[in-house]
Image (cartoon, coloured by chain):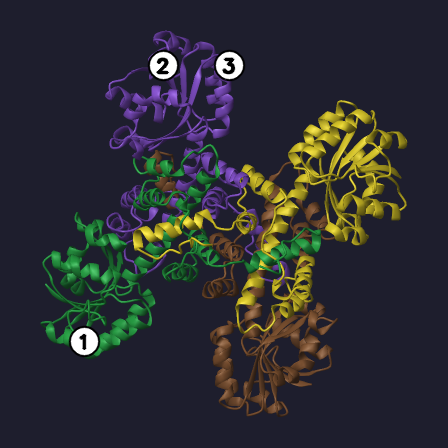
Chain colours: A brown, B yellow, C green, D purple
Amino acid sequence: MQLGLVGLGKMGFNMRERLREGGHEVIGYDPRPEVSDVPTLAALADALPTPRVVWVMVPSGSITRETIVSLADELSAGDLVIDGGNSRYTEDAPHAKLLGDKGITYIDAGVSGGIWGLKEGYGLMVGGADADVERAMPIFDTLRPPGPREDGFVHAGPVGAGHFAKMVHNGVEYALMTAYAEGYEMLAAEDLVEDPQAVYQAWTNGTVVRSWLQQLLAKALKEDPGFAKISGYTEDSGEGRWTVEEAIRLRVPVPSIAAALFARFLSRQDESPTMKAVAALRNQFGGHAVKRISESG
Amino acid sequence: MQLGLVGLGKMGFNMRERLREGGHEVIGYDPRPEVSDVPTLAALADALPTPRVVWVMVPSGSITRETIVSLADELSAGDLVIDGGNSRYTEDAPHAKLLGDKGITYIDAGVSGGIWGLKEGYGLMVGGADADVERAMPIFDTLRPPGPREDGFVHAGPVGAGHFAKMVHNGVEYALMTAYAEGYEMLAAEDLVEDPQAVYQAWTNGTVVRSWLQQLLAKALKEDPGFAKISGYTEDSGEGRWTVEEAIRLRVPVPSIAAALFARFLSRQDESPTMKAVAALRNQFGGHAVKRISESG
Amino acid sequence: MQLGLVGLGKMGFNMRERLREGGHEVIGYDPRPEVSDVPTLAALADALPTPRVVWVMVPSGSITRETIVSLADELSAGDLVIDGGNSRYTEDAPHAKLLGDKGITYIDAGVSGGIWGLKEGYGLMVGGADADVERAMPIFDTLRPPGPREDGFVHAGPVGAGHFAKMVHNGVEYALMTAYAEGYEMLAAEDLVEDPQAVYQAWTNGTVVRSWLQQLLAKALKEDPGFAKISGYTEDSGEGRWTVEEAIRLRVPVPSIAAALFARFLSRQDESPTMKAVAALRNQFGGHAVKRISESG
Amino acid sequence: MQLGLVGLGKMGFNMRERLREGGHEVIGYDPRPEVSDVPTLAALADALPTPRVVWVMVPSGSITRETIVSLADELSAGDLVIDGGNSRYTEDAPHAKLLGDKGITYIDAGVSGGIWGLKEGYGLMVGGADADVERAMPIFDTLRPPGPREDGFVHAGPVGAGHFAKMVHNGVEYALMTAYAEGYEMLAAEDLVEDPQAVYQAWTNGTVVRSWLQQLLAKALKEDPGFAKISGYTEDSGEGRWTVEEAIRLRVPVPSIAAALFARFLSRQDESPTMKAVAALRNQFGGHAVKRISESG
């Protein structure tokens, strides 16, 4: 089918590729002319047959908001907008309302798979009305991995459900990564274990802990033994934070996900103020030595 | 090759099956005559050609210890014993010494895969001398899953390294399970999500969080929607506890693994003494109501 | 000085008492006529000399909001409103704005001390303009405990700073309670320790862990040995949740406070969905037994 | 009464002082002649009237063990040895046995209070037989703080109970320090709060979180605002590790204490291998940038 695709960054660019390979006519728009098929959002709207379908794949937050506002202007009643970015699910209802006031319908789609999605397909979690999801199904069927539809795609519920499921997916992802990483640190710390990489490689087949992430860790360790070349400084993209916030709202205890999130915060601190306070306290009551910060360095 | 197999429980029974299908001549011994091939350990020793290879697959702890002691009596110099059970790696050196005093060599083998190993193969992590591991390789090659050897088998280091790697494997397994389970609880708690099972099913393909455990959770949810039929009471087998203990010895922070372990402890308490104390404290300073335990129930 | 006090619940009632004992003329208003000094908020405004000072001590959330809105109607330019309740600090700026539009100034005051404050004084953390804080100082000086002002009172910063400091105070309080409670559970679990109460009693003097909360735990254990009479079911009042949410906003790792919060959530669950999922998973891969929920009960 | 005191370090030296001020005749032995009252342990034994009482105050571990062995040689039946150091409680039974074989009795005493104990008294938790504890009571009564005996002293149970209670005390102490420290970091991170020190100072009186440790943190912040002069690098003394290990043995969930312990481990790492692995994983699946370790530095 014909569709518009707004945002041709790391994810959107690959998705245009996969959709075209799947036989769709994709008109992509991006502010960077070197990747864009049309010069403006208005031109994108003009180029699409009505009723239009437009997939938005831009960074979450204000850029998504502005794009939705612009689309409300450029599109017309009967059109369908799909937000495939990592928007917080709480923004979906306002976006749906904003577009709905013009008769434009809305789907939120959580997209997983990273840079591997181009070749292997993207895991999809969508929220919206049945009719809208049905209408966009040819797109979803091309983006998702081959195999039974229910193994790589879910219509999780009404508007918001897709991004909620994607948010939880990412929260779980944080915790999984930390679990594997803690295991790595233990293997690396124990002298008996001659090569942690070999252990991680062996775990890729037949074990209970095997997974795609686990394979990637084995691969990463092969490429950079002992992780000698990289720092532990780790960003967080928002969805881990939102997961813990929503867990608090829902009164769901999530110690693993929270531990993974806090570990990322900590990885970006040169010195932990918490631990400075602990060190200072020990010194106060026990006369325990503290490590002074030397004047020269 | 010919080998003895001591212990024909859930794991050993299946392994005898897989080894025989792989062309090995296995003589199994178990105290339960209905599954045993020979009446006694002595008969097992008699039935095997020397130098013998004997795989021990009995519950960890005192039963493994006693089996090793008995084998030291029944076997002779040049024989090889492989402990495939879930022994703590700290027991491997004493076992190797005990057998070594008689000229018997020793390998520790961590075996992963559970009840699925019979069909899919077992992930193997072994510790021991090169010559011993080489000698037992035909057994390992049959037990491990098909594919490149390094993807389902590792010679992790000297005696102890196999069980150490398996212990860490299980610690990671604890944390992975908790991560997926926290995600499930969040999906189940949010009204927007119509069917958490469908989301877990969709995650099995194309997503970053896909894994064998993740598939099993989708399967479990399909078999028992909402986990209506089971309790959250969860045993722990020892290896989770050892992982945290060894992490402490190695000064490795393992918040995820520890959280998973503590969650199991908690699952077995009817009432948490910790939370009784917290409730009592709140009542003391704030006059907050506490839930009295009714006299009748 | 003369002041109005809106809200005569557990906290407000005691504070009226303490303020009167300190020589202030307090006119209290509460919807319950049996404790109220005046029939309406309007009557409260009429009874106070201008410029008025009104202390609000009602439950946080919509009731505080509505009270502020009503006061904006009843009071006049030059008056001062102090919100002493447990409002989230993010509500202070809107409240200050709402009142400020009428020329009424605003202070937020975090109040600690619980039911003991009447006799011992309340720890106070306030936010607002210097002139406003100065004006209300006679009230603060009566409410706070005797001794140097800086030991029981802080002007923490502009509007919002008082409630922020109080929120953190309560987050820390959650973690402290859990710390003492975990220690209690360990003492109670170890056979060598004949009486955990006696240990907690002994900790009240000379030890590093002594504190007011620690004394209260010793007292609670004396009143109800083994906490036989109460359940571990524990509410949370909002401030623990907000602390973790604000920690996430500030990118501050707070594992202890989060652990304490999650423990409260868990204490209110009959069965943990997370642990049901873990139990189901173990059953899937290991054939481990699960505890079935019996049909009869 | 007359007693010997072996070990005149930071703690023992002060205790000799306090005991002498309390009217006891203390003969101190230490390998450093400048602080020792006698040249050898044998001389100490000779100088004491029989039956002797000897308090051991040396670093836990092998030094305590060796001291007990030496005392078994130098002392005689009817004497009493008190181990006041931070020994792991599991060592008490062997020490008691070793001495008991010679007719010498044994008490384990956990001592809290740090460098402040000299002036304020030490919190004491002891384990041993009733008669032995009774015999040493004059010593305990001098060392403990003034006030009711049960507020600073507990005979917690048989041999081992004292050190067990002290171990739990220190585990709780770890968690308390982390709780206060997390609160500090939050106050320091929030712009609204003008001076975290002032807030901590205000918490010392009237608040629910007030405590001795809390006062010390206010004091530490006054001496080194913003903890500008110290590093967060924090040692751990053994008792925190043991507490988590014993919690595991007792199946007691201790998330707060474990979090505090792991935070210390982390404070001593320049780079977290766990977070390197997480960063590497993110890069693998998402193409997320990693921080390269520059070649020059």
Q: Secondary structure at mark 1?
A: loop
In the image, A230 versus D225, the foreground residue is: D225
Q: Is B15 above or below relative to C160?
A: above
Q: Are marks 3 and 2 on the same chain?
A: yes
CA separation in Å, label 2 and label 1: 81 Å
- Judge from the rendering whether residue C152 lies leftward or rightward of residue D48; answer left or right: left
Which residue is tagged 1? Answer: C40
Q: Which mark is residue B209?
A: none
> Which chain is disc 3 placed on?
D
Task: Give above or below for A67 relative to B3.
Answer: below
Residue type, mark 1 in image: Thr
At numbered mark 3, what does the secondary structure look like: helix, strand or loop? loop
Give the numbered dot on residue D101.
Answer: 3
Task: Write down the residue under mark 2.
Answer: D33
Q: Is residue C240 left or right of residue C114?
A: right
Mark 3 nearby-residue class (10 Å; few <14, some 14–19, many ≥20):
few
Where, quadrant-wise, is the N terminus of chain D in this rendering? top left
Q: Nearer the viewer, residue A296 or C165?
A: C165
